[in-house]
Each structure stands twice: as structure tokens, then as C-alpha cells.
Image: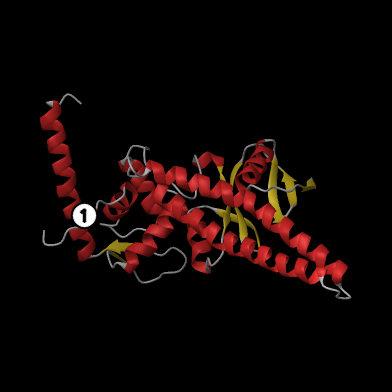
Amino acid sequence: MKKIKFRFFLDYEKEEAWVNELAAQGWHLQKNIISFFVFEQGEPGKYIYRNELVEGKKKDYYEFLESMNIECVSKFGVWAYYRKEAIDGDFELFSDAPSKIQYLKSITRLFIPIALLNIIIGIFNIITGFTASPVAFMSINLGILNMVMALLMYVPIRKIQRRKKHLEHDLHIFEA
Amino acid sequence: MTKEYPPLTEGVYYILLALFEARHGYGIMQLVEEMSKGRVRLGAGTIYGAIKTLLERQWIEALEDDGRKKEYIITENGKKVVEYEILRLRELFDNGIRITNGKA
């Protein structure tokens, strides 16, 4: 049996936790396209799921994961979902602070420019909207949409920065 | 030891040790977990990132690709780094034992 769920998350870690909650109930993720999730029913708790921003990752990375018994179940845009059988024990992609920090940095490197671009284009659209242009109404709406996008991206960016800061702080006393 | 290296992370130290014999990613993970009695469980992304950096530094090298599972082995440079790290760890260990009178 399959089911499709629609759910919007601002925090990719919360999304991952939700996918794992469903896996524990026997609903295993098969496909994820932005906010649409396809689950297939199976043995409860069989898999542990992890998501990752995979911008710039090449084929050899997926082959490497595969050789570690990690199955890539879904890849859409810059996000991928993996699973590993829970019987193998705990499953984390990154096990120490330096590699976790590196990963968080790769996310903000992508998110921050996009958010800034939305602000700039948003301002431009709103200014255009206030001129006597024939498309003024549309420009203002677009501009507002840009601003909303930037605001929506600000939430995860702030969370990631906080996580990163926390990890970096620990590195002052701990090696990893 | 002619050249000084900054301390290695636990993960990198164990990965280098594991590669004194040719191993692929999964082999590294298993051996490290075994050596540390389950304490150090390296993530696949962490191992992948470490391998890439270690290859760039030429501390390890990839063996001829025999299909899917690529194997890696430590180089002479890599061995020197490990030897240096062992000396550093010995210094830490010896000083610790001396000052605490080995009570730990």
C-alpha cells in the first residue's frame, strides 16, 4: 500500500525526523518532490532515513554511499534522501564536528545568496510597482512574493547558523 | 621528525591506521568501529570527505579501480604523519600518567 502526503517544512532536520517517525510506523519514504512525499507500507522501523543537500555532489559520491550499504531512495533538485537498514545500527552521514560544520556551511553557501537575490529583486519589483508602469500591480505582487521567499529562507539560515556556532564553540574544548 | 603537523582528528587518525592495509570505505568503517570497540562510528559523508582531502594531500592513494568498490592505501607521506601523531599522543599520554600518577 502506498500513500502520498503533503507537508511543508522550513527545517530540513524536522522534515527528516518526521520521515523517520513515519518509517518507525511502517511507512517508508520512496519519493520526495519538494513537499510531496510518497510512502510505501512495510515492516515498521526497518530503515533509518537521512536527508542531505547534495549540491555539487558527483556520481562517485553515490557509489561510495552504495558501497556503505546506504541506499539513495530519492533525489530531487538539491536534496536527497537516503536510508539504511536499522539492523546495521545507528546511521549518520557526518560523525564529527568538523565534517558537520563543513556540511552546514555548504547549505548556507547556497541559501544565503538565493535569499539575498530575492531581497534585491523584490526591492526592484516593488520600486517598479510604484512607477506608473502598466504592470505595476503585478510588480508589487512579485516583489512581495520575493520578500516572502527571502523571509522563508531566513528561518532555516538562522537555524543553521546557530547549529554551526554551537559546534564551533565546542571545538574550542573538544577535538571533534 | 622534520615537519610538524597539527593534531589529527580522531576520525582521520583511525582512517589512516585502517589504510595500512588496502581497504574500501565500508572496510574502513568496520575496522575503526572494531578497533575502538564500537566507540567511533564514522559517518559515510565524513569518511568520503576525509578520503578526498587525504587524497589531495597524498597521504593516501587509490588503488586500481576494480569496479564499484574503490580501495585506498596509505602512502609513505601518510605513514610519516601517523608516526608523528603517535609521538604527539605519547607525549600527551606520558604527561597525563606522570601528573596523575597513573590513577586514571
Residue sticking out furthest to the top: B103
Closer to the camera, A157 or A77?
A157
Closer to the camera, B86 or A105?
A105
Residue A22, quarter of the rendered image: top right
- Name the residue rendered at 56%, 44% in the picture: A85
- Name the residue rendered at 68%, 58% in the picture: A150
Left or right for A24, reference B32: right
Residue B65, quarter of the rendered image: bottom left
Instruction: Check disc 1 and report the residue beneath it.
Output: B82
Q: Chain of mark 1?
A: B
Residue B1 image point, x, y percent: 11, 58
Residue sticking out furthest to the right: A134
- Name the residue rendered at 74%, 51% in the picture: A37
* Residue type for callout 1: Val
- Please tell me whether mark 1 sits on a helix, a strand or a loop: helix
The C terminus of chain A is located in which quarter?
top left
- Name the residue rendered at 67%, 41% in the picture: A18
Residue A171 makes an appearance in the image: yes
